[in-house]
Image: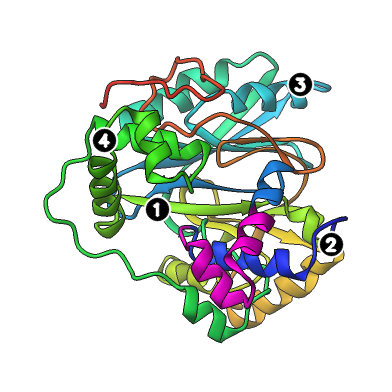
């Protein structure tokens, strides 16, 4: 663990991975500490850039997503990755080993906007030599990874109620304003959130509750993984029999090492993309052996080590993996728009 991060911090982070909106009273009960202690620990982690909570699209919010990979000219991968990170639709960027040494994960409100980003905007970045992209057809994991700091009983105690079926709600500009405000701080109080979006507290409380209950809005907790000894990232492309893709994807998300796992279309021989976080690079071999023992027909098409993570779900990261700045994830922003960093929420038209 990094200096200043102890077992209570890890347990607190795990509880917030399970339920990013758990109150400090709930967290205190689960972790057997006072709410004041839980709050103080959390604010210390956030102020140091070690942890953060932000909004995420819920399962009922329609989105299109893609994996975008670039081969950069020698010596410019860092500049290319930094430029990719300025796009509000590019939610994560990593520099890796291998020929295609920068990959970005992209989300957009519709297929037209996604295609504009993949075909025009991102390939035009100076220093990009060659690109390839694949559409994400199914998300298996991305918001609920675990550090192993809680018992099964503690997990059950903090697990939130599942989202219910929607009731015909149409996602509108008010919802977008809330989503973007919560990108900066997904645990904003109703009072502060109302101040940011310029609406009354009762209206904000009702709408946030509606979005959460009906699956339009979700929250995710992120953590500078190196702080807990997860020092090495890898990105894998797998070839899986079509009939087994869902089974392999759901199996992979049970691995403690898995960070992000999706089915992809158009990735050549590969149809599953997964990123993992390891204590050391040699830990990858046992993970692969476990996967192949469970699914012998799986083929590892490509393996790359992550040299530097530049952006993670809207957070610009320093070399130490800590959050330095926020570029809010905005799936509705025009493909050519400049990101707006800082506390102001930029309003764009829904498409």
Q: How far apart are marks 1 and 2 (CA)?
A: 28 Å
The location of residue 302, given as percent across then percent down, is 68, 53
User: Which callout, 1 or 2, points at the residue further toward the start of the chain?
Assistant: 2
Residue corresponding to mark 4: 200
Quadrant in the picture for residue 178: top left
Q: Which of marks 2 and 3 is in front?
A: 2
Visual colour scheme:
rainbow
First of labels 1, 3 by sequence position: 3
What is the number of callouts on the image?
4
Pointer 2 with pointer 4, Cβ within 8 A: no
Question: Which residues are the magenta region?
Answer: 21-42
Residue 28 higher or lower than 346, as above or below: below
Residue assigned mark 2: 1
Residue 73 image offset from top left, x and y in percent: 76, 21
Q: In this view, does 89 lie to the left or right of 161?
A: right
Of labels 3 and 4, the one closer to you: 4
Which tag is nearer the camera, tag 1 or tag 3? 1
Picture coordinates of residue 155, whole percent (x, y): 53, 78
Does 126 appear above or below 323?
Answer: above
Q: Distance between the residues labelled 1 and 3?
A: 38 Å
Q: Which residue is under mark 1?
A: 218
Q: Name the residue: 88% across, 55% down.
A: 3
Residue under label 3, please give it. 73
Q: Is mark 3 on a helix, strand or loop?
A: loop
């Amino acid at each position: 663990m990094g200096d200043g991060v102890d077992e209570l911090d890890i347990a607190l982070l795990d509880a917030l991975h399970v339920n990013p909106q758990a109150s400090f009273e709930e967290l205190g009960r689960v972790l057997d500490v006072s709410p004041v202690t839980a709050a103080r620990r959390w604010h210390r982690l956030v102020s140091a850039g070690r942890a953060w909570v932000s909004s995420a699209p819920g399962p009922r919010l329609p989105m299109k997503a893609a994996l975008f990979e670039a081969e950069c000219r020698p010596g410019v991968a860092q500049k290319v990755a930094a430029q990719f990170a300025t796009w509000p639709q590019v939610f994560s960027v990593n520099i890796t080993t291998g020929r295609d040494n920068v990959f970005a994960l992209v989300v957009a409100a519709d297929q037209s906007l996604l295609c504009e980003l993949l075909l025009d905007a991102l390939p035009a970045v100076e220093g990009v030599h060659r690109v390839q992209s694949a559409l994400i057809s199914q998300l298996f994991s991305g918001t609920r990874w675990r550090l192993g700091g809680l018992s099964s009983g503690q997990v059950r105690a903090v697990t939130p109620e599942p989202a219910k079926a929607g009731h015909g709600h149409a996602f509108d500009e008010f919802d977008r304003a809330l989503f973007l405000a919560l990108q900066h701080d997904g645990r904003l109080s109703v009072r502060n959130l109302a101040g940011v979006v310029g609406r009354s507290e009762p209206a904000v409380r009702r709408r946030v509750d509606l979005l959460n209950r009906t699956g339009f809005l979700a929250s995710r907790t992120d953590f500078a993984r190196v702080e807990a000894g997860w020092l090495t990232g890898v990105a894998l492309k797998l070839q899986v029999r079509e009939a087994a893709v869902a089974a392999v994807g759901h199996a992979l998300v049970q691995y403690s090492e898995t960070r992000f796992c999706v089915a992809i279309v158009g990735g050549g021989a590969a149809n599953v993309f997964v990123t993992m976080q390891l204590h050391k690079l040699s830990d990858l071999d046992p993970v692969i052996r476990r996967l192949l023992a469970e699914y012998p027909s799986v083929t590892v098409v490509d393996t790359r080590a992550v040299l530097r993570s530049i952006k993670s779900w809207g957070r610009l990261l320093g070399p130490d993996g800590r959050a330095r700045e926020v570029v809010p994830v905005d799936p509705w922003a025009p493909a050519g728009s400049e990101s707006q960093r800082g506390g102001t929420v930029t309003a764009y038209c829904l498409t």
